Each structure stands twice: as C-alpha cells, then as structure tokens.
Image: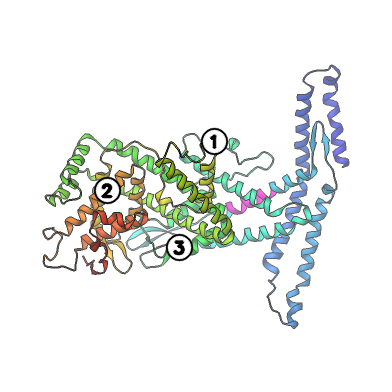
Amino acid sequence: QCLFMKLKSMMELPLLRICQCNSPDLASVSEYYSQELVNYVRVVLEVIPVSMFNTLDGIIHIQTTQLREMPTKLERDKVKEFAQLEERYQLAQATHSVSIFTQGIMAMQRTLLGVIEVNPRELLEEGIRKQLVKRISEIMHKQLVFHKKEVSMFGMTSWARLDFEERLVALSTKLAGFRRSFEYIQDYVSIYGLRVWQEEFQRIINYNVEQECNTFLKKQVPDWQSAYQSAAVPIPVFPAADERSVNFMGRITRELLSRTHPDRTMYLFPLSGWFDMEGKEVVGIRMFSLLKDSVGVLGLSGIDKLLCFMVVHRLQTLVQSYRVKMTRDVTRALAGFRHQMEPLNGLPESFVFYTKALEQMPRDMWDELLSAIVLLGQAQLLRRQIAVEVSATCKLDSNSLSCTLEALNDAVMRDVKAHYERPDTAPYPGDKDQTRLMPELTQHLVTTGIHNPLTQIYITTDAVEEIPALVFLFTLSQLPKYSYDAHLSVCAPRERKDTPDSCALIVGVLTLLRQFHSSETQTYMKLLTQYIRSLLQPNAPYHKDKNATKAFSAEATTAICFLEDFARYGNIPRDVLQMYLPPYIMDHRDTFDGSS
C-alpha cells in the first residue's frame, strides 16, 4: 500500500505546468502518464507471480513423484506408510510460502494511479496468467520436438519416429501435474484455477494454430494483430525447431502426417488405424487417446483446423493446376470418351474405348493427380479420426451438451430442408432475426466432433469441364495396381513399392468430387458402375472363364470393392448403388475371386 501511495505522488511533477496553464490536453497527458505508471507497477509486482511459480515447481515435484495415491481399502499397519508425513509437511510448507507471497496484495483495495483506477488483485491475476502462459508454452515447445532417423524398410526409404509416443506421454504427465498443482493452490491465491487454466490454454492453442495457418494465407495475421495475443499477458514466440513448421502445432500435425503417409501405411476402416506392411499398428485409437491426454480436446481441435487449411490449400492448387492442363485436345478427348460411353445406364460398344481413352491422356497427368489426391485422402482420414475421438470424449464428459447439440443440429437441418421445399413460407434459419445461429452452431459441432469431414465442401469453384470423365479415367489407371484382399476386406496393393494406400486414394477422389455439383459425383458413379458391368460380360478381356457363374475376375472384384468403399466413406445409401448395379452383384462378395 505504501508503494502505491509513493508511486501515486510521481504524477504531480510532469503535470504541474500543464495544469497551471489550464491546457485542454491535461486529460490525455494524464491518461498517458497514468498508463505508463500502471505498466511500471505491473512490472514491479511481477516478482510475486515469478516467486510463486518457483515455489510451485516444488509442489509439482512433490505431488507427481513423491505422494502416493491412497487406495480405497488399506490395512491398518500400512496407514503410517501411506500417510507420508514428511512429504506432506514439505507440501504444506511450500503452500504456506505461496500464500505469504500474495497476502499483501489480497489485503489491498482499489486505488487510483493518476486517473486510472487499479485493482491490485487483477494485477496479481494478470501476473499469474503471464507466468502460466510462459510455463505452458515452454513445456509444449520443448516436448513437441521429434527426432528423425532414416531407415530402409521393404526396399524403400522411410522415416521412423522413435520417440513420438514417449514425447506425448511425457507432455501429458507434465501438464497433468502442473494443472493439478495449479488447482491445488487456487484457494490460497484467491483465483479460479481451472477457469484460468482453460482460458489460457485455449488462447495458447488458438494463437499457435493461427500463426501456423499463416503459411496458407495470402493475407497473413501478424503477431501484433492477433486476437489471441495480449500486451498484459503475452504468448511467447520461440524460434522454429524445423524448416517446415512455425511452432509446436505445426510439428505435431506434420508428425502425424508423416507417420500415416499413404506410401508406408495402410488404413483399415474396421480397426480405425494405420498399419505398416508387417501388420503393426502405427497410429490408431491409442495414439489419438494419447494426443487427447497431452494436448487436450483443444489441441485436437487445433490439429483439425490446421489439417483443414492444408486440405483447402491443396484443393485450390489442384483445381488451378488442372484448369491449365485441360487443353483443348484433352477436353476434346474426354468429351469424345463421354459420347462413346452413352447411354451410361447401358454398355459401351467396345471395351477398347477404355484403353484408347487412357492412351490419349498425357502421361505426366496421373502422377501429379495421384500425389495430390492421396494426400487429400490422408488428411481427411485424420480429420475423421479426430472427430471420432473428440465426439467420444464429449459424450463421456458432457453427454447433455452432446445430446443438446445433436438435437439442435437436427432441428436446424429440418428447417433448412423446409426452406428449400417452401422458400416463400419457411425462412432460412437465422435470416429472420439476423442471428449468427449457423456459424456458431457449426463451430460448436466441429469442436465437439459432431460432424463428418468426408462430406464437407471446402472450396467454391466454377465447374471444370469433363471432371467426372477425368477422375474416372484416373481411377481406371490406378485400379490395376490393387487387388481385393478378402482377409482385410480392402483393396490391397499388388506391389507395395510406389503404390499408395487405397483408402487414402478413395477418400481423396471423394473429396475432390465433393467440391463440385452433386451431379458430377453421380456421373462418376455411373461411369464406374458401367465399367464394372462391362467387366462382368462374357466377352470382357479380363473374364477368365466364360462358363463360370460364381467367380468374377480379379479386376471386377477390385472395382466393386473400390465402389463399395467409395459409397461407404461418402455416406451414399446402398439403394443408390443398386440403381446403377444389379443388387445380386453387391450381395455375393463371398463368391468373388480375388486372385490375380
């Protein structure tokens, strides 16, 4: 209190002359010097939070490494052993030291520093928040740095991440101990520890995601313009630890992308995980559970947002690139192929049309398209897995919130459908009262995992000529690289070298088609089902035995598997498939011959 009173008297000297001449600038000058004085007081009082957090380090060490959990049932002779009186005395001593640091500030009332009213408790809370943000940011920056080692596997070069899980476990342990100890001392410093932790942790994640996303934006958001940065409680900025990422959010996202690369792993839908060629799980449900425990639901949402920016950037680049490559000759060849296939509900006159159409396409077109599409599919599968993990966590931790959002989402969707059926009588949700219902509901649904990334529209673009025929011929060029694996129920690569995961390929094709009108996806499915019907004809070049009635060719089996996976990932009903393909073909997978 005495310090504040002495600092208050410092305002008299710089304002003496300006006050004597009755200058109209007295108010603005007084406010300026008052703000400078408040900033100086904030710096002086920062020694209290710094000392408090130094003592808190000892509390964290005691609670995480020395104190043992008390079991539910305990024998009488072991009570003294589990009491740990010496450790609890040290904990009490450290807690008392923390309360002593803040005792003087807690006793002070609001006071004026110049023309600005200052609440010492708010200054103390700002100092605590500043140290909390600094400590959390340092922990995440140091822990989320991954070492690489180049190894050879199955005749190709891959990157083995040796300490990914260990880093996540260590980060989870440190943050959990830090949070538990911070909540433990909240009553002794008169702050809401859990609320402060959640607010600052969310701000750290959002700020780092925003800065990482700047690499995909034309108009970037600098540090000083960020909505998550603060002058009183700044988020520290660390130098980049690698060449590709700006901060730890970029590093952990790119580590996931590297571990699940389609060239080295295979995604299995029933197991919800990525596996290497030896059958070992590389990334799965356990890995995402570790991610949730380490960076929390907010961290998973940040990874999801960063993946979303990556998908948008890749889609925009892909569409722009193929607008340039769609020359007059290519467009004419695709249009001619479409004309030869009509009517799409029938059969082509000759199977040779498929071969000729593939030969007319530029050879380098498929390689670039394959690379972009499988990376799109990989990011989409990761987003889907994140949504599953976050949704499960929300249902366990807050089932009421999950049910409320699902009910509200269903109600809004019914209103949207009613608007398009009766636009004159049914207004669009949110338009009548000019509310932000749709954007805010969407944000809540994405944060709680109640959404399907595989059906999302990322970009708005004009139609690309003959895009269904182009994507179909691309699919046709890739199908010979795969064969149906009855044990895994997937399209497995015939040769692992230079053959990406079929699930990433299918989801990438689906994502690309979703960015255009729905009729383009329907046309693509008609072309694919027409190709399957052609393979089942007795005069098809791949038909092994004209008298066979139970065994389909390996090519037909692979194409049917591709179609079914395409429909499953895209939430396309089976009734729609049966409009283009006879139902008995879809119902007799057990009779398929998947051999080469």
Q: Which residue is mark 2?
A: 524
Ranked by sequence position, the earlier of labels 2 and 1 is 1
Tell me the mark number nearer the camera, choosing from 2 and 1. Answer: 1
N-term mark: 3 or 1: 3
Closer to the chain start, of discs 2 and 3, is 3
Q: What residue is disc 1 on?
A: 434
**Local crowd at mark 3 within 10 Å, few (<14), some, or many (≥20)?**
some
Residue type at mark 1: give it. Answer: Gln
Q: Is residue 13 visible?
A: yes
State yes or no: discs 2 and 1 in contact (Cβ < 8 Å): no
SS at badge 2: helix
284 horizontally vs 232: left or right = left
Disc number for residue 284: 3
Asked if the residue at tag 1 contacts the one at tag 3, i.e. Cβ–Cβ closer than 8 Å, the answer is no
* Quadrant for the C terminus in the image: bottom left
| CB contact under 8 Å: marks 2 and 3 | no
Compared to residue 112, the image places residue 389 above or below, namely below
Residue neighbourhood size for the residue with mark 1, other residues' Cα within 10 Å, grouped as few (<14), some (14–19), many (≥20): few
